[in-house]
Image (spheres, rainbow, N blue to C red):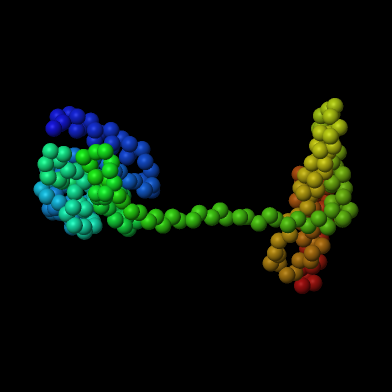
Amino acid sequence: MSPDSVKDEFYGQLQRVVDAIPQSELVVIAGDFNAHVGADRQGWEGTLGRFGVGEVNDNGLRLLSFATTNKLVIGNSYFQHPRKHQMTWRNPMGHDSTVLDYVLISSRFMSSLKDVRAMRGPDCGSDHYLLRAVMQLRLKRTTSKSHPVPKLDWSSLMTPPSQQLFQIALSNRFAALAMGTNADEEEKQMSDVVLECAKSLCPVICRRTQPWISNECLQLVDVRKQAKLVDSNRYRQLNQELRRRMKMEREAY
């Protein structure tokens, strides 16, 4: 028998390992605990099943307490089998046998555990029988939500106000470009600048809800928005023009 200090140290280390596992994760602990958990479920109803074996001992109380604290169940005790398929250890010097090995699993995943029993056939080179646990996991498929790429109204670049803003934006960006010695890199930089400027001036095609506003007026709203970023004088001119058109269209509606 190990002294209590050794047992305390073992369960202390095991507790630290379990504490490091996220609570949402499935926890399965299996091994030789050298414990008898017994068959008496009183006080351990959420941890011990109806098919425990024998009488509980000190090591069994430690295991039951550890399992209860961490919301684990003693998997062996939830499945009915002949006694020979419950015993996990045999005495090499005699015919005595008992249960010392256990499978513990998170109580919220108990439905995934389909069976636990000792396998007497395989030769494990040990006085312990092979303990088999059958599990059927129902894993939730995670799907990433795809966000649709917004559609741009490229035709808006055909309007004179947009063309003027496009030229101004290009001039500002080209002036900030650092000239290098690699022609391919320069060509790529210039292409990227042209595309970025075009995208910045093209409004997103979206569903409009105001029936009294014409498409031309809506395009002017988007052009005014872009003008605010590059040309304050042009923005004021477009703002006046937009107000005039919106007043006319609202009155006509």
Residue 91 located left or right of residue 105: left
Residue located farthest toward the bottom when viewing the structure as drawn: 253
Residue located farthest toward the top when viewing the structure as drawn: 181
Image spot of residue 228 (x, y percent): 77, 46
Identify the image quadrant of residue 69. Answer: top left
What's the residue at 77%, 61% (across, down)? 218
Where 184 falls versus 229 (above or below)?
A: above
Image spot of residue 178 (x, y percent): 81, 29
The residue closer to the viewer here, 232 or 152, is: 152
The residue closer to the viewer here, 80 or 47, is: 80
Identify the image quadrant of residue 197. Answer: top right
Image spot of residue 28 (x, y percent): 32, 46
Placement of the N terminus among the 4 image quadrants: top left
The residue closer to the viewer here, 88 or 182, is: 88
Where 53 falls versus 60 (above or below)?
A: below
What's the residue at 89%, 53% (across, down)? 160
Residue 107 located left or right of residue 178: left
Residue 145 located left or right of residue 128: right
What's the residue at 32%, 40% (across, down)? 18
